[in-house]
Image (tube, rainbow, N blue to C red):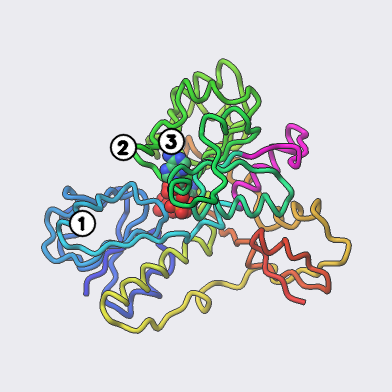
Amino acid sequence: MQIYADENMPLVHEFFSQLGEVTTFDGRKVTAAQLSQADILLVRSVTPVGPMLLADNQQLRFVGTATIGTDHIDQAYLQRQNIAFSAAPGCNAQSVVEYVLSSMWCLAERYQWQLTDKTVGIVGVGNIGGRLARALNALGIPVLLCDPIRAAQEPDFPHTDFTTLCQQADIVSLHTPMQKQGPNATWHLFNDATLASLKPQCALINASRGGVIDNQALLAAQQQHRRPLVLDVWEQEPDILQALLPYCDIATAHIAGHSVEGKARGTEMLYQRCCELLGVTPEIALAALLPRPAVEKLQISANFGLPDVQSVARMLYDVRRDDALLRQHLQQHGFDWLRKSYPARREYSALQLVGQAVPAWLGQLGFNSQI
Ligand SMILES: NC(=O)C1=CN([C@@H]2O[C@H](COP(=O)(O)OP(=O)(O)OC[C@H]3O[C@@H](n4cnc5c(N)ncnc54)[C@H](O)[C@@H]3O)[C@@H](O)[C@H]2O)C=CC1
Ligand SMILES: O=C(O)C(=O)[C@H](O)COP(=O)(O)O
């Protein structure tokens, strides 16, 4: 079995060597000729998979992407070719939530906001948006949820339409997939008109896909009237619109989902799917492969309260580090280098909170607790 995998897929040898020979490739540069002998192809978000890339291959059985997003995959083509496909839904959802929380705390500090006085509009309430809503709920921060697809399917879903959300939210966080066409298309969801419909000081956070915001329209809007802005994703990555950087409070290199756990879970999910496809019993589990976190336990006293969460969370992840990395290294090393050399970052769950009175709501944020 010939398994071809993106070189930025952690633990791919540890998981997949049981199933065949693993060859890695550069996900931006990989060619059809390189993949002609692949039985299994494992990609990340930087590799568009379709007829162009698979033209020389007659034997491919499975394509997997170790990501949540699937906008780089021509799934209709794979289906026509009878090639099985799987993404890794939810694999790095917690990582993105931690990125957004860190960004909000950073904005709150910079602009001296009390977050409990702000209303956060979440657009796209799936794995990430749903988790974010639960976390904000635990922190006592009011939310508005916009998800027309869920609203159509779930009678009790508390949907706020997009226009109303734009008018009412103080912070808007985007968590939709990238969809170019159809009634719920998200491409340029934020354009000249919709950007203008936001409150003047409404903060905008995009950790979904770059194209959900028209970046040129955003630049023009920021030049006219600057609003708090957090961008993890950009149009035309890796050649991003650098003129936007000075207008961002936080600017990062599409790393919101790059926690150690988030990336590794993506690999594990594809391994499990491949085992299922091949009728093989999985022998390897992620828990045994994850490195020990630098800090494993923290003793919580009965005095631990909401204001203390931010300090504990920041010990694990502070988005300002990644903002500094992009601003410092983009020119010299480029966007992809920043992603490839991303420093290890553990999720909240890596830290055991111990004590007699660990508040239950910390679980809603993703922390592990133990009495
Ligand atoms: N920056 C990063 O590192 C990462 C970015 N992502 C992006 O985040 C996206 C969302 O991830 P998940 O929450 O896990 O996906 P999901 O599929 O669980 O949820 C997406 C939600 O968006 C809703 N939606 C679709 N079109 C919409 C529209 N026009 N308006 C409002 N809601 C709409 C869907 O109904 C669904 O509930 C991914 O598709 C991916 O592109 C995901 C992981 C990491
Ligand atoms: O899961 C997704 O979707 C993402 O955007 C990833 O977190 C980033 O994916 P890569 O570009 O590292 O594949």
Question: x, y percentage for residue 118?
Answer: 71, 37
Cα distance between the residues tagged 3 and 2: 12 Å
Mark toward the start of the polypeptide (3 vs 2): 2
Q: Quadrant of residue 297?
A: bottom right
> Which disc is residue 212 wearing?
3
Mark count: 3
Taking depth in this image into account, of 102 and 76 the one nearest to the observer is 76
Question: x, y percentage for residue 23?
Answer: 28, 66
Taking depth in this image into account, of 13 and 176 the one nearest to the observer is 176
Mark toward the start of the polypeptide (2 vs 1): 1
- Which residue was labeled with disc 2? 181
Q: Which residues are magenta?
A: 98-120
Mark 3 residue element: helix
Q: Quadrant of residue 352?
A: bottom right
Q: Quadrant of the C terminus?
A: bottom right
Q: Quadrant of the N terminus?
A: bottom left
Residue that appears at 42% across and 80% down: 284
- Which residue was labeled with disc 1? 78
Mark toward the start of the polypeptide (3 vs 1): 1
> Relative to residue 43, is residue 104 depicted above or below?
above
